[in-house]
Amino acid sequence: MRNIELAGKVTRIGDKREVETKFGLAKVAAAVLEDDTGSVRLNLWRWQVDTVKEGDTVLMMNAFAKTFGGQIELNIGGDGKIIVVSRTSKIER
């Protein structure tokens, strides 16, 4: 599915690591994005890793979803955007 626009809260960001891609080394981290309907894994790449923080409410534009390992994952490609709508210093649980 492509051209997805949605908003949600980043409730978790996993460990940041570097991976080798066909374009060279890239930072990557897996996050969890939640809204009133549930949660989904959000893959953060390169600049996205340092832009988004746990507790942020974000708007994702032109995202795409794919299935990997039987789970749906969201990604932001080169033509997509992540906009931090609000930033909180602490996650409410």
Image: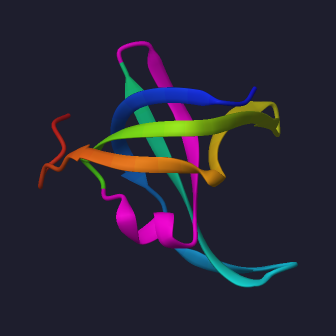
Q: Is residue 64 above or below residue 44?
A: above
Q: Tell me residue 30's x, y (percent).
A: 56, 55
- Looking at the picture, does residue 31 appear above or below residue 85? below
Q: Quadrant of residue 73?
A: top right
Q: Position of residue 13 (x, y in %)?
A: 43, 56
Q: Is residue 92 above or below residue 88?
A: above
User: Is residue 46 shown in magenta?
Assistant: yes
Residue 46 visible in the snapshot: yes
Across the whole image, how many numbered discs are drawn on residues?
0
Q: In which quarter of the image is the N terminus?
A: top right
**Residue range highlighted in magenta:** 36-53
Quadrant placement of the C terminus: top left
Location of residue 8 in the rendering, given as x and y in whole percent from the top left corner: 36, 31
Q: Residue furthest top?
A: 37
Q: Residue at x 37, y 23 (%)?
A: 35
> Which residue extends farthest front?
79
Report the front residue among 10 and 92: 10
In this rendering, does residue 15 appear at all? Answer: no
Whether residue 89 sits left or right of residue 62 in the image: it is left
Tell me which residue sits at (36%, 58%) in the image.
Answer: 52
In-image side of 90 versus 67 (left or right): left
Locate residue 2: give its quadrant. Answer: top right
- Is 43 in the magenta? yes
Residue most toward the left? 89
